[in-house]
């Protein structure tokens, strides 16, 4: 489906609920070679460190993306972020990451860290846009595909 930015209602970011899981899992499975299982998502709801947000089209529209990050003291780690293929490149990830950074700043977080596949140009470009810096490499982090992970970090001033 192709949706032009001109007719797309405003994107809304709100907390993820268990009712969102079916839609989230559809996006997850379409987005990753090794998707998180339903159990992994459910476990996030019992984890007090975990912050989970979805982005929807309009207030009550479909879920088109999600972000999960953990806040531990003054550090946050981006665990998962994905956007529905049909809604890519419309600013959904940008909106979610901006909200994540704002929330982190408001909670006294100083650093946001993440790992990203070396081949994931779209995500790397997105993180660079937000000022994340490449700070290291985890060799063979994605064992099945023998792919390295780039470690990235954003210092929140
Ligand atoms: C990475 C991902 C989350 C981006 O979502 P998105 O909603 O399409 O991104 P946005 O529209 O907010 O794009 C914001 C910026 O990111 C960069 N970007 C996004 N997709 C890109 C692409 N395919 N190629 C190059 N840069 C890209 C651009 O700088 C873009 O700004 P612009 O559109 O003004 O040029 C999405 O491609 C995705 O779900 N990928 C699969 C899951 C994944 O890899 N997650 C990251 C795991 S570390």
Image: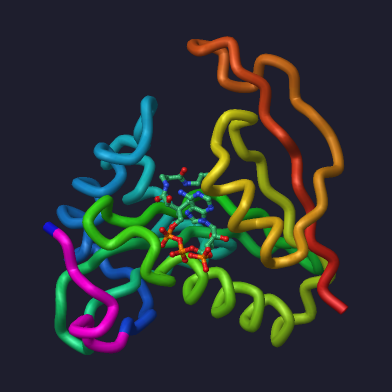
Estimate the x, y position of residue 31 in percent, counting from the top left: 33, 40
Q: Quadrant of residue 8?
A: bottom left
Q: Identify which residue is drawn at 64% across, 83% down.
A: 102
Residues 125 and 75: in front is 125
Quadrant into which the N terminus falls: bottom left
- Colouring convention used in this rendered image of the protein: rainbow
Estimate the x, y position of residue 83 in percent, counting from the top left: 35, 56
Q: Identify which residue is drawn at 35% across, 69% down.
A: 54
Q: Identify which residue is drawn at 18% across, 69% down.
A: 3
Quadrant into which the C terminus falls: bottom right
Q: Identify which residue is drawn at 81% across, 44% down.
A: 134
On screen, 109 above or below 21? below
In this rendering, would 40 be left or right of 98?
Answer: left
Estimate the x, y position of residue 143 in percent, counting from the top left: 56, 13
Residues 86 and 68: in front is 86
In the image, residue 137 lies in the stretch drawn in magenta:
no
On screen, 113 above or below 52? above
Estimate the x, y position of residue 26 in percent, counting from the top left: 19, 46
On screen, 43 above or below 138? below
Residue range in magenta is: 2-10
Q: Main secondary structure of the magenta part?
A: loop
Q: Quadrant of residue 119?
A: top right
């Amino acid at each position: 489906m192709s949706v032009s930015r001109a007719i797309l209602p405003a994107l809304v970011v709100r907390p993820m609920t268990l009712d969102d899981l079916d839609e989230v899992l559809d996006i997850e499975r379409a987005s990753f070679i090794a998707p998180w299982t339903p159990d992994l998502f459910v476990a996030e709801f019992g984890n007090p460190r975990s912050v989970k947000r979805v982005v929807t089209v309009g207030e009550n529209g479909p879920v088109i993306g999600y972000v999960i990050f953990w806040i531990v003291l003054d550090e946050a780690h981006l665990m998962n972020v994905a956007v529905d293929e049909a809604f890519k490149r419309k600013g959904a990830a940008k909106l979610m990451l901006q909200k994540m950074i704002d929330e982190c700043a408001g909670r006294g977080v100083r650093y946001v860290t993440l790992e990203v596949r070396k081949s994931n140009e779209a995500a790397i470009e997105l993180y660079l846009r937000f000022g994340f810096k490449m700070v290291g490499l985890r060799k063979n982090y994605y064992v099945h595909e023998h792919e390295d992970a780039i470690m990235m970090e954003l210092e929140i001033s």
